[in-house]
Amino acid sequence: MRVDTHVHSSYSMESSPDRSEPSLILKAANKAGIDGVCISDHDTMEGYRETARIRKPGDPLVIPACEVSTTRGHLLVLGVDRDWPERPEPEEVVDQVRSEGGVVSAPHPFYISTISVSWLARELRLAVETFNAMASVLIYPNLVARKFAVKYGLPTTGGSDAHSYEMVGLGLTVAESGTIDGFISEIANGRSRAQGRPPPIGFSVRFASRSAGTALLRLGKRA
């Protein structure tokens, strides 16, 4: 099964509302010929729930996920449909997810960002997102993440980090199982692999510009 395990819908703030609607994500996943998508919005499950609701027979699987903002960085929760408190402790998130049969991955762990968890992945024995299509523009974040996962024997995932439907399918987690539970189990047991390709450079530059603008706006509000 080939699944994009890191897709943001219009329920994520940095997404383009008119280019990240759940219906557009499903169409893009169909076009990409992949088997499933994890709708992993920031701190909300509403995008996943809407996408699952409108999914039609024959569409790619829609797998619950969430990019949870913890006190020490973002964690990518896969396979669990539940709401999270604001800024939980990462250890609490990991324990809860594992108790419910899910798996936690460290998204873009070595990207230049305060939200990356990096070394926390080793401490908590997380899966590592060794291919992130957005981070691939800089080359080194994915390279370092792959070496890190190999060095510490950690499972791997891959995702597009799509904030617009054009990105869906550019990053994938590949496993043998054809079921959601089996797919999650194979990640947890280190039997998955990451693959993908970078987005067009023009798209990456536009997204980086929007993200920088959003970050500056947040800083201005805090000042």
Image (cartoon, rainbow, N blue to C red):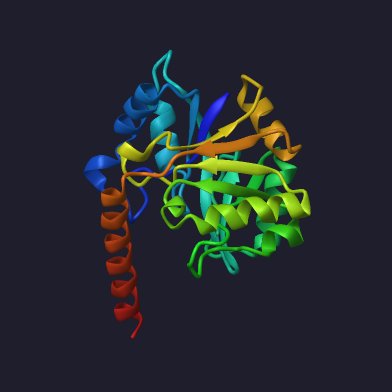
| Snapshot quadrant of residue 54 | top left
The x, y position of residue 113, in whole percent, is: 48, 67
Taking the view exactly as shown, the residue that stands out farthest to the left is 18
Q: Relative to residue 199, is residue 117 drawn left or right? A: right
The answer to whether 93 is drawn above or below residue 215 in the figure is above
The residue at 54%/37% (across/down) is 195
Quadrant where the N terminus is found in the figure: top right
Q: Is residue 212 visible?
A: yes
Quadrant where the C terminus is found in the figure: bottom left
Q: Relative to residue 201, is residue 177 drawn left or right? A: right
Q: Relative to residue 54, is residue 2 drawn left or right? A: right
| Snapshot quadrant of residue 215 | bottom left
The x, y position of residue 71, in whole percent, is: 59, 69
The residue nearer to you, when weighing 215 against 63, is 215
The residue nearer to you, when weighing 130 against 21, is 130
Q: Relative to residue 156, is residue 82 drawn left or right? A: left
| Snapshot quadrant of residue 178 | top right
The residue at 32%/25% (across/down) is 27
Taking the view exactly as shown, the residue that stands out farthest to the top is 57
The answer to whether 12 is drawn above or below residue 216 in the figure is above
Q: Is residue 107 visible?
A: no
The x, y position of residue 118, in whole percent, is: 62, 63
The answer to whether 41 is drawn above or below residue 62 in the figure is below
The answer to whether 87 is drawn above or below residue 178 in the figure is below
The x, y position of residue 127, in whole percent, is: 67, 47
